[in-house]
Image: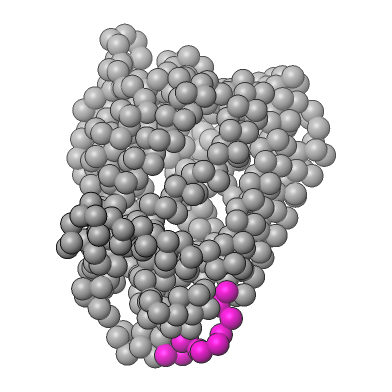
Amino acid sequence: MDTLIHSASDFLDRPGFNWKGLIIGFSTVNFLFESYLKLRQIQTVRANGEKIPDELKGKIDTKTAIKSSNYSLSKLKFSIVGSLYGLVQNVIAYKFDLLPKLWNATGGFMSTLLSKNMVPAFMSGIITHSLFFCGAMTLFSTFLSIPLSYYQNFILEEKYGFNKLTPRMWVTDMVKGFSVGLVLGGPILAAFLRIIDYFGDKFMYYLSIFMGIVQIFLIIVYPKFIQPLYNKLTPLEDGELKTSIEKLASENKFPLDKLYVIDGSKRSSHSNAYFMGLPWGSKQIVLFDTLIDQCTVPQVVGVLGHEIGHWALSHTTKLLAINQFHMFWIFTFFAAFVKNSSLYQSFGFFNEQPILIGFMLFGDILGPVDSLVGFAMSQLSRTYEYQADEYSTKLGYGEDLKDSLVSLNKENLSSLVVDWLYSAYTYDHPHLVERLNHIDEVQEKIAKKE
């Protein structure tokens, strides 16, 4: 593999090659393609008007259907504007060589701190410089995201009754996110860069192992230290719901440790349920308070039957393994670019070749390939959703699961119709009607066997 990587590296390092134009071109084509898909979906929603699919007649009223269509159209239009905003930012940053300018500025800032003994002398290297650069990038990105974030929460979501955030909470959440990024992301990024620098051409093996450990670390740390920063988890009170869930877990040998209710309503009216824990360890089930309010006990149990199906069928473990394999090949491909002088020079880096900058630019080059991988992963995820629905249905919760899916779709104002191409590329879950039909098919098969 080393020979192949060296050959690819030599082939790709072409003096004078316009990498900047290539990346801007990739980004533009991706924006145009995704906008085309969104416009197809807009056309589909508009053409449907207030019509309700046959499978949902009698379950969703006309008023909800109209509100759902309007919400979907608002989100799609906002998404196109948001994507255009991001594209313009990237084009400006690349066109006017803002990356090397920010790199030099953060380097000067670091030198000033070193000269005043505000930073230890041993932290004078390129890794510390990269951390300062990444911190500045994150700060600027957060600042630039404020207009869209404000509009999304306080205008779009507010209009349809979902937003529960106050301006104070909104600002606090941004500060918390930035702080968590510094505390957790800083050391992880430093180790990431150090591994690439230390192990040379064989870094992809060690980096893959390291990132696998990071994934496990975050699974452990998130519920204990990060989640409480945003939401409060309280034990589910004794009662019919708790008894039913514990019975479901026991019957399926699900390693249930604790049952929590999360105050999701503090920020939004949207609802969800999930479980936390390592694939091979005990699990904690988390229910949004909005889910409990919106669904009956059998419906909630039906949803959890679906979630337990993911565990029983090892979906999470499989996805972790696939993600690990995916990361290894990304790092392997990056090995062919990490010392590509023409790439760095195309973006204004003539004297230095910072690994962090190389990885950022490589991510943009990999965009088209990553889109294909994302599409494949979405198809796999949809398959897993069907399998989990089937698992819950075979437990006897088919009708309850259907009712809960309709209820959640109604409460979240999810689109009642989808364009097939938009759905195939964008959705990692089957559409509501597709899931209802699949559950019916499973129930028919069960009935025939009986």
Q: For the magenta stretch, what is the residue range?
A: 10-20
Residue 77 shown left or right of residue 289 in the figure: right
The image shows residue 121, relative to residue 340, as above or below, that is above
Measured as percent of width and height from the top left, residue 127 is found at 28, 64
Measured as percent of width and height from the top left, residue 296 is found at 47, 15
- Farthest-out residue, top: 239
The residue closer to the viewer here, 188 or 329, is 188
Measured as percent of width and height from the top left, residue 62 is found at 76, 21
The residue closer to the viewer here, 281 or 302, is 281
At x 52%, y 24%, the residue is 167
The residue closer to the viewer here, 257 or 240, is 257
> What count of labels does the image hold?
0
At x 27%, y 30%, the residue is 284
The image shows residue 116, relative to residue 7, as above or below, that is above
Residue 270 shown left or right of residue 155 in the figure: left
Which quadrant of the view contains residue 253? top left
The image shows residue 417, relative to residue 1, as above or below, that is above
Q: Which quadrant of the rendered structure holds the N terminus?
A: bottom left
Which quadrant of the view contains residue 313? top left
- Residue 13 on the magenta segment: yes
